[in-house]
Image (cartoon, rainbow, N blue to C red):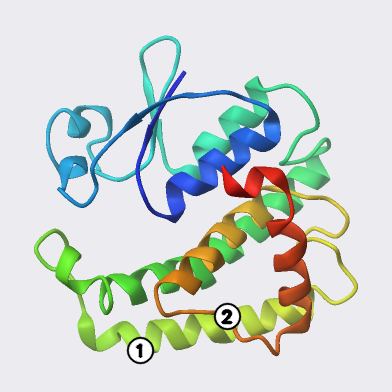
Amino acid sequence: MKLYNSMGPNPHVVRFFAAEKGLGLDREEVDLMAGDNRKAPHLERNPAGQMPCLELDDGSFLSEVTAICEYLDEVGGGESLVGATPEERAETRMWTRRIDLNIVENMANGFRYAEGLPLFKERITTIPEAADGLKQIAREKLAWLDGQMDGKDYVCGDRFTLADILLYCFLAFGKQVGQPFDESLANVGAWFERVAARPAASA
């Protein structure tokens, strides 16, 4: 397998997940700053022009980080980062979906429409006037999640999962682009330090 990699939080999710699974992936860098993800040959791999993209051993391609990670979970060895039972998998997917829709998407678009506007305004439709509101929604949903994590080590209780990896990579990104999370969120803060201490977090 080969990972078409670049800067940004989405590729970080896949690298972190693969490292947790003990999977070594060949990598090929795609220059996001130069817009190579929006040109051939990358558009032949992923017509959506997004990063990352995983080339499978049969020559086919997968994109979308949750799909890639679930595939790696199934083909990789060791403990599942999605779940060992239908109930665990459903719980992981529920929290991954909540985090993706409520926090990740709002943070990402808040960045694209504000700090990232010079890079994105010629590539996608941007809504600069929505940036502050999107960032505020992400903050509110993270504060809600902080309450839900009371007494938990990880998002799904004592299980470290894809939900944690997705949230960590975007909160780490947010700290670099003007969206640091509120340090008064004690549960999220303790969780963040716990996840950051995992060796795979630096993948």
Judge from the rendering whether residue 53 lies leftward or rightward of residue 161; answer left or right: left
User: Which residue carries the number 2 mark?
Assistant: 181
Point 65% across, 84% down: residue: 143
Judge from the rendering whether residue 16 lies leftward or rightward of residue 5; answer left or right: right
What amino acid type is highlighted by mark number 1? Asp
Question: Residue 57, how many percent across, how many down?
Answer: 45, 11
Point 54% across, 65% down: residue: 172
| Circle 2: element type | loop
Q: Which mark is residue 188?
A: none
What amino acid type is highlighted by mark number 2? Phe
Point 73% across, 66% down: residue: 193
Judge from the rendering whether residue 76 lies leftward or rightward of residue 151; answer left or right: left
Question: Residue 145, how many percent across, how many down?
Answer: 69, 76
Q: Earlier in the sequence, mark 2 or mark 1?
A: 1
In three-dimensional space, the C-alpha distance between marks 2 and 1, rounded to whole angstroms, equals 15 Å
Q: Is residue 46 above or below residue 64?
A: above
Q: Which mark is residue 132?
A: 1
Binning the other alpha carbons within 10 Å of mark 1 as few (below 14), some (14 to 19) or many (20 upward) gives some
Judge from the rendering whether residue 144 lies leftward or rightward of residue 130; answer left or right: right
Outermost residue to the left: 122
Q: State how many labels appear.
A: 2
* Of 93 and 21, the residue lying toward us: 21
Question: Residue 169, how many percent across, how many down?
Answer: 55, 57
- Please report contact status of discs 2 and 1: CB closer than 8 Å, yes or no: no
Point 51% across, 35% down: residue: 68
Nearest to the eye among marks 2 and 1: give it.
2
| Circle 1: element type | helix
